[in-house]
């Protein structure tokens, strides 16, 4: 069985250290302190990257430098999917926050 990762797919987080991480000062902190920020930052970076790729493909298509016009369509679909993923992450985070604010202690 081949266990090599598929190129282009990056894990959202490493599964090695689930309980604690080390900060620069050497103190251990909970992973949950930055996991949401890391997930959102990864999604934002993915949107920026796919949007730049889409813009480049559209430019190359418009100037006649693109050999395969399907590449522009694929780049546009990737950019759209990345934006939709980011919007869904935001919606789920807002739903979770709303649920937490409704909890009475």
Image: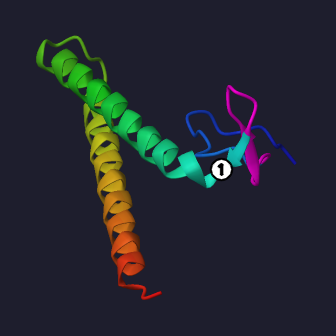
Tell me the quarter of the picture where residue 28 sits. Answer: top right
User: On the picture, is 11 further left or further right than 101?
Assistant: right
Local crowd at mark 1 within 10 Å, few (<14), some, or many (≥20)? Answer: some
The correct choice, above or below, for 28 with respect to 23 in the image is below
Residue at 13 percent across and 12 percent down: it is: 63
In terms of depth relative to the viewer, which is nearer, 70 or 81?
Answer: 81
In terms of depth relative to the viewer, which is nearer, 56 or 89?
Answer: 89
Type of colouring: rainbow
Q: Report the magenta stretch's main SS.
A: loop
The correct choice, above or below, for 63 with respect to 78 in the image is above
Residue 15: where, in percent of width, then height? 74, 49
Residue 4: where, in percent of width, then height? 77, 37
Residue 38: where, in percent of width, then height? 51, 42
Q: Mark 1 points at which residue?
A: 31
In terms of depth relative to the viewer, which is nearer, 29 or 66?
Answer: 29
Tell me the quarter of the picture where residue 95 sits. Answer: bottom left
Q: What stretch is highlighted in magenta?
A: 16-27
């Amino acid at each position: 069985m081949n266990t090599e990762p598929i190129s282009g797919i990056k894990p959202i987080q490493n599964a090695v250290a689930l309980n604690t991480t080390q900060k620069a000062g050497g103190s251990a902190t909970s992973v949950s302190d930055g996991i949401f920020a890391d997930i959102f930052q990864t999604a934002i970076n993915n949107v920026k990257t796919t949007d730049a790729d889409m813009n480049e493909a559209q430019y190359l298509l418009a100037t006649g430098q693109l050999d395969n016009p399907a590449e522009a369509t694929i780049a546009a679909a990737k950019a759209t999917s990345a934006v939709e993923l980011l919007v869904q992450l935001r919606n789920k985070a807002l739903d979770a926050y709303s649920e937490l604010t409704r909890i009475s202690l």
